[in-house]
Amino acid sequence: MILRTEGLSKTFEVGVRRRRVEAVSDLTLSVPEGEIFGFVGPNGAGKTTTIKMLMGLIFPTRGRAFLFDAPIPSAEAKARCGYLPEHPAFHEFLTGAEAMQLFATLAGVASADRRRRCDELLGLVGLADAAGRQVRKYSKGMQQRLGLAQALVADPAVVVLDEPMSGLDPNGRREVRDLILELRARGKTVFFSTHILPDVETLCDRVGIVIGGRLRDVGRLGELLSPRVQAVEVTAVAGAGGEAALAGGRVISRDGEQVTALFDGEEAAQEAVGALARGGGRLLSFTPHRETLEDFFLRRLKEQPAASGPGEAAPVSG
Ligand SMILES: Nc1ncnc2c1ncn2[C@@H]1O[C@H](COP(=O)(O)OP(=O)(O)OP(=O)(O)O)[C@@H](O)[C@H]1O
Ligand SMILES: [Mg+2]
C-alpha cells in the first residue's frame, strides 16, 4: 500500500474553555499504488485535517498513518510525495517562473534539470504565458494552477491534492481532470479531496465518503451506488391519443406537443411506451435514472443528520 491510515483521529481544542472538536475519528483506509482516490465530504467533514495529518503538518491525537509503509513523517514521504494545500500561498513578489525555481530548488531538483522542469510544468498547467508575471497579479485560478505545478515539481510518486478544482473555471477543471488521468497513466498515485461530485464520478477508481469526521463508505463507485433503476424519464410527442398513455407518470415538463413524464419504475414506463404507440404518439427518449454519486451522498447525509458536523467530544476537565 502506498498510503495507509489506522484509526487516525484528531481532536482540536477551541476557545478559552478548550471545547473539544473531534475533526477526524477513527479513520482507517488504504490506497494502493496507481490508484486515483477521491476523498469526498461536506464542508467541515475533516478532509483537510486528514490530509494535513498525511502530510505530517499536524499530528494525530490517536491512530497512525503511513506513506510508502513508513510512519509519517518520513524522509521518503517528503521526497516522493507532492502536495497541493487547500489555500496555496506563495512569495507574491516572485514571478511564476521564479516561484517554481524556488520550489524546484527546495525539492532538490538537480540544477541542470530545474529550468526545463519548471518550464514544462508551467506549460502543463497553462501558465506558460504568465510565467514572467508576479504571482500577486495572478487570479485565484492561476494561483491554483501554480499550486498544482508546484505539487508536481519533484516528479512525485504520490500526489495529495486538497481540492484541486477549487477556483477553476470549467476549462481549468477539465484540464486538471486530464492532468490527474495523465498522472495515473504514468503510474502515479493520486489522493484528492473535493465536493465536486461529477469530477469524482469521471475520475476516481475508488471513493471515500467522510461525514462528521468519520469514513462512512469506501469503495468503487459501482459497488456503492445502487444499480437499481430508480425512475425512468419518458419524452414523447403525445398527440391527441398519446397524452393518456403518459398518465401513469408525473409530467415534469411540457414544450408544445412535447411532454416529459417521470415513471417510478421500468415496468410502468414500458407500459406507457406501449400505450403511446397504440395511441398514435411518438417516443422521443427513454432514459432510465440510476443512483448518481450525488443521490448517494445526499442519502448518506440524510441518514446521519446528527453527524453532519464534526463530532463534539466532552470538554477537557480542569
Ligand atoms: N486548527 C483548527 N482548530 C480548531 N478546529 C479546527 C482546526 N482545523 C479544523 N478544525 C475543525 O475541524 C473540522 C474539520 O475541518 P476540515 O478543515 O478538516 O474540514 P474539510 O472537510 O476540509 O472542510 P471543507 O470542505 O470546508 O474544506 C471543522 O469543524 C473545523 O472547524
Ligand atoms: Mg478542506
Image: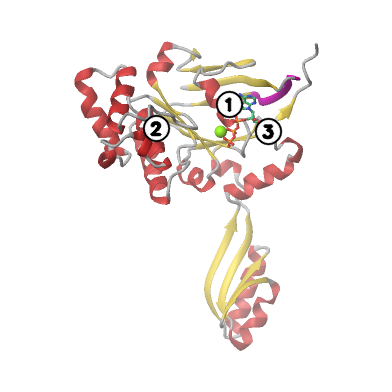
Q: Residues within 10 Å of mark 2 (few under 14, many from 20)?
A: many
Q: Residue at x 48, y 39 (%)?
A: 204
Nearer the observer: mark 2 or 3; the answer is: 2
| 2 and 1 marks in contact (CB < 8 Å) | no
| 2 and 3 marks in contact (CB < 8 Å) | no
Q: Is residue 228 above or below residue 67?
A: below
Q: Is mark 1 within 8 Å of ligand 1?
A: yes
**x%, y% of residue 239?**
58, 86
**x%, y% of residue 261?**
63, 71
Q: Quadrant of ligand 2?
A: top right
Say which residue label 1 marks.
49
Q: Residues within 10 Å of mark 1 (few under 14, many from 20)?
A: many
Q: Quadrant of residue 249?
A: bottom right
Say which residue label 3 marks.
212
Dot 3: what SS? Answer: loop
**x%, y% of residue 47?**
57, 31
Q: Is residue 279 left or right of residue 99?
A: right
Dot 2: what SS? Answer: helix
Q: Residue furthest front?
A: 93
Q: Residue furthest left?
A: 112
Q: Provide the residue span drawn in magenta.
A: 17-26
Question: Which numbered circle lies on residue 147?
Answer: 2
Give how far apart the Cα atoms at labels 2 and 1 are: 19 Å
